[in-house]
Image (cartoon, grey):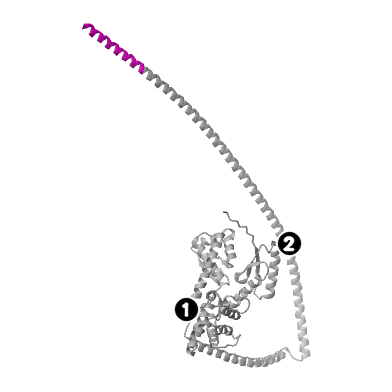
Amino acid sequence: MGELVLGLAIGLVIAIVASFIAFRKGIEHRKRIAEAEIGSAEQEKARILIEAEKAAENKKREVLLEAKEEIHRSRVELERDIKERRIEFQRLERRLVQKEETLDKKLEMLERKEEALNKKAKEIEALQEETVEIQKKQLAELERISNLSVEEAKEYLLKTVENEVKHEAAALIKDVEARTKEEADRIAREIISIAIQKCAADHVSETTVSVVPLPNDEMKGRIIGREGRNIRTLETLTGIDLIIDDTPEAVILSGFDPIRREVARIALEKLIIDGRIHPARIEEMVEKARKEVENTIRQEGDRAAFETGVHGLHPELIRLLGKLKFRTSYGQNVLNHSIEVAHLAGVMAAELGVDIATAKRAGLLHDIGKAVDHEVEGSHVTIGADLARKYKESEEVVNAIMAHHGDTEASSIIAVLVQAADSISAARPGARRETLETYIKRLEKLEEIANSFAGVEKSYAIQAGREIRIMVKPEDVSDEDIVIKARDIVKRIEEELEYPGQIKVTVLRETRAIEYAK
């Protein structure tokens, strides 16, 4: 029993000692592993530090290299700028020297002219003195020959002039009385015409300018564009002259053609609202404005037909009526005049028991030829009659159009009524102004002369007729030919037109290359 206990005790001691030894070995093993890991981490740290230093060194070299390159580029640009400025200064210096030499020559020339003038002044003074002496001698000789003194000669001449003046005064009084009587008859007929009519119409004198308001004066610079390219594009596309002056927040459009002026006004207003003003956008807006004006023309034609109660008109006649809104005759709007003539003819037809519808129809269409008289050869009477026949109007209407100016004999009472209504509408005080019509016809003739030359694509009379700009086809007219073309047009204008001052003829040739990326 004792031996068993002893054996257990010895085994327990051995187990404890073995466990302690194993524990010590485990601790030493883990210590070695930890030391190995620490050593590896130290090596990794050293490696990372080395790589970081290398990367920093490389980055530093790159930054230094870029800085050197930037300094080199700046130096090259600076040297180029200095060289260009030096060349510019040398050019300016040469120009100044040339101008100084020119001024010296002009000063010398002026001094010579002054000497010549002084010499001529002395000669003139001597001649004047000699002339006075000659006049005295001539007067004394005349008194001797005529046996009349100066006072007696004056009295004789005054009596002779008095007798002639009395005779001319009597003739003038007689002529004034005759003209006064004729004027009184005309005024009486005018008063009667106004009294018998049952409609009244407003007459607004058409002008040759339109004013476009601007949101601010800064917009003027954007409309002009860089080096004036925007304003030149707009004037070229529309044929209208843009006047940008000191008028606050406004641009003036000047041109004798109301349709072109309306297109320019609408296009400019659209550009101002849109804010993007450049040549391509201007072309787009001008095209949109042309379509909008075309729609307005059709609407105005429909309105005129509806207002006068004339139905069944051909669509093209309605469109031509709409164009009359932009046409004036002696300052009177032709569409308003046509509507008024239709009403007047209808009222008088009702009083006489004649067909009212036909009278109104003939009155509305009597000036339809004025819508295209600048495009077709012939008078507006002949053109209007041809249009009426083309679009199947009755013979009564055609005859009324032909006879409304007395060119053809009236074959019906309708034609007589239209002629009377036309005279009443035109004769109303303030209805017409001759100066504007004459002015517009002169501008149209100016464009007609330019368009008659071969190779001319478009022409626009601007600056109140003081300038005409002509666009030629680049494929038909060369750069050398435009000089000859301008001279030929000037000769034709001088031969065929009467005008105050002078007219500037500008011939433009433009070549465009357009491709599309697909």
- Image coordinates of residue 415 in percent, x first then y, are 55, 86
Q: Secondary structure at mark 2?
A: helix
- Image coordinates of residue 484 in percent, x first then y, are 71, 66
- Image coordinates of residue 408 in percent, x first then y, are 60, 86
Image quadrant where residue 510 sits: bottom right
Image quadrant where residue 485 sits: bottom right
The residue lying toward the viewer, choosing from 365 and 333, is 365
In this picture, which residue range is highlighted in magenta? Answer: 1-26
Q: Nearer the viewer, mark 2 or mark 1?
A: 1
Residue position marked by numbered label 2 in the rendering:
108
User: Viewed as shown, does residue 238 lie left or right of 100?
Assistant: left
Report the disc number at residue 265. Answer: none
- Image coordinates of residue 363 in percent, x first then y, are 53, 82
Task: Pick the quarter of the image with the N terminus.
Answer: top left
Q: Secondary structure at mark 1?
A: helix
Residue position marked by numbered label 1 in the rendering:
307
Q: Residues within 10 Å of mark 1 (few under 14, many from 20)?
A: few
* Residue extending farthest top: 3
Please tell me whether residue 149 is drawn above or below residue 317 in the rendered image: below
Which SS does the magenta portion mostly show? helix
Task: Pick the quarter of the image with the C terminus.
Answer: bottom right
Q: Residue at x 66, y 72 (%)?
A: 449
Question: Does residue 412 appear anywhere in the picture?
Answer: yes
The residue lying toward the viewer, choosing from 219 and 46, is 46
Q: Residue at x 53, y 67 (%)?
A: 291
- Earlier in the chain: of badge 2 and badge 1, it is 2
Label 2 amino acid?
Answer: Glu
Label 1 amino acid?
Answer: Glu
